[in-house]
Amino acid sequence: MRSANRLVVALLASALLSTACGARLSDEQRSEALSQFGGGGGGSSLAEGGEAAVDPLAAGPEATSAATAGPAISGTTGGTAGTAGTAGSAGSAGTAAGGAKDTRSAPPGGNGGATDKGITADTIVVSNVSDISGAVPGLFEDAQLAAKAYVAYFTAREGTIYGRKLKLLALDSRLDAGANRSASLEACAKSFAGAGSVSAFDQGGAPVIQDCGIPDIRGLSTTNPMKVVPNAFPINAAGTGGARSLSMFGWAKDTFPEAVKKAAYVYIDGEVTRTLAEEDMEGTTKILGYDWIYSSAIGITETNYGPVVRQLKSRGVEYVTFTGAYQQAAALAKEFKAQSYTPKVWQPTVTAYTPDYIKQAGDAAEGTYIAVTASLNEEIAQNKELQTYAQWLNQVAPGKTPTGIGQFAWGAMALFVEKMKEIGPKPTRKALLATIPKVRNYTGNGLFPGQDVGGKELASCTKIVQVRGGKFVRFLPEAPGSNRCSDKIYDTKTKTAKEGFPD
């Protein structure tokens, strides 16, 4: 399971525990829930300490045009479409960007008009079904905002694909399986394809997506029923269930081999997080040689972490990992300091990859290690695609910064456009679906490690950052933009290790 999927189950446990008691989430709880998905690209809003620092919120060159027509976006089933940023000029329709074959204009014989559902002579409707409202408002809004940002970017840069404009059908799955089913039904009826969708309870829409045959290039599949839908292809390839990436743990085994012999796993309690912890400990013990000498489940409403830290200290734990929100990770780090406890490795999940963790933990955050899959915002100066995403995100949602979830959704939209150009001016769902299985090492133009989108094989690439001097700094691999991809995948069914993608 990739880090994003790991965060899904952590969040679900917290959200379900809160709502099971009939309670409305407080602002603090909502913030905690949202933070579960802020990592993987949300380390900072600006490039820090790098050369030629780039402001990711500055409008890109295409966004400075005086054109006023924004991209076509509609929204239903409880969500609002939001406001589209000012779209730049699409430029001449005579030549495509970079002098490549022109795919903007309809060919002399026409584009075939309404060649399939969601297609007209001048429009392609692409849907995004993500959790926008519900018990945790804004949960996967980053995925939908990234889709909107890409439509704005494409509208300004190229304008049309064989004479057709892109129109985004923005749908809200409301953190509910039933709502996900309803939104999926609407997507099937009104759109040609889906792109960038992320929903916690996507099992609700899984049979709908499969039955209607819509090409669904998702940002992420969160449940096993969606992972096995043959026409659903998540950009963050997470296998088809029963697999766990060991990349979060492999680096520590190689770097701190003695520390992992005295390891502890602390997590926010819930049925799903409990299972996740058990499988992680089982896999790392069998494959990596970890020795878990202590584990502890902390209640979602618990604020006194003193007893847990006393146990860690008294047992001589040298490696500590934690699954929960960044606020809880910060509180635990502060308790470490209060009790003068300094493990050799303190590694919360990617939830802590946010400036808010450092702000809340203060100097207690120093030395924290975090595994991250998607691109680092700290390296935005060296990543053109991350810059483009950030610039156009600011056009549709001023002040927002890139996140890991958003990077995969942006990548989904980019792949959809690429394949729509490839299949020609008379597209059909069947033709589009025929192209996706061939996509075997997709990086979103450098946004994330290569993903086996077509084969759905789980990868195990990651990078490690560390908090130093109040900032996130790359720890390993050292080269900017690089990833560690040497760790195995643990098969929870056979209890054995296998190679991840690429093998």
Image: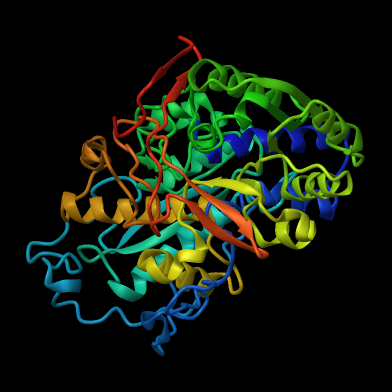
Side of 277 where 75 appears, left or right: left
In the image, residue 184 sits, relative to residue 467, either above or below, namely above
Name which quarter of the figure residue 433 lies in: top left
Of residues 394 and 351, the one nearer the viewer is 351
On the question of residue 230 being in view, the answer is: yes
Residue 266, compared with residue 368, is above or below; it is: above
Quarter of the rendering containing residue 19:
top right
Nearest to the observer: residue 278 or residue 309: 309
| Residue 147 on image: x %, y % | 46, 58
| Rendered location of residue 120, percent (x, y) | 29, 57
Query: Residue 54: image x %, image y %?
Result: 46, 77
Count every numbered label the image shows and give the total. 0
Asked if residue 369 is positioned above or below residue 176 in the image, the reply reads below
- Residue 6 x %, y %: 59, 35
Q: Residue at x 64, y 57 (%)?
A: 354
Say if residue 131 shows up in the picture.
no
> Residue furthest toward the top?
494
**Residue at 76% across, 26% down:** 270
In the image, what residue occupies the spot 37% across and 83% down? 61
Image side of residue 192 versus residue 242, left or right? left
Look at the image and tell me in which quarter the C terminus lies.
top left
For the point 40% across and 59% down, the residue is: 480
Along the viewing direction, whichever of 429 and 51 lies nearer the viewer: 51
Of all residues shown, which one is farthest toward the front?
Answer: 258
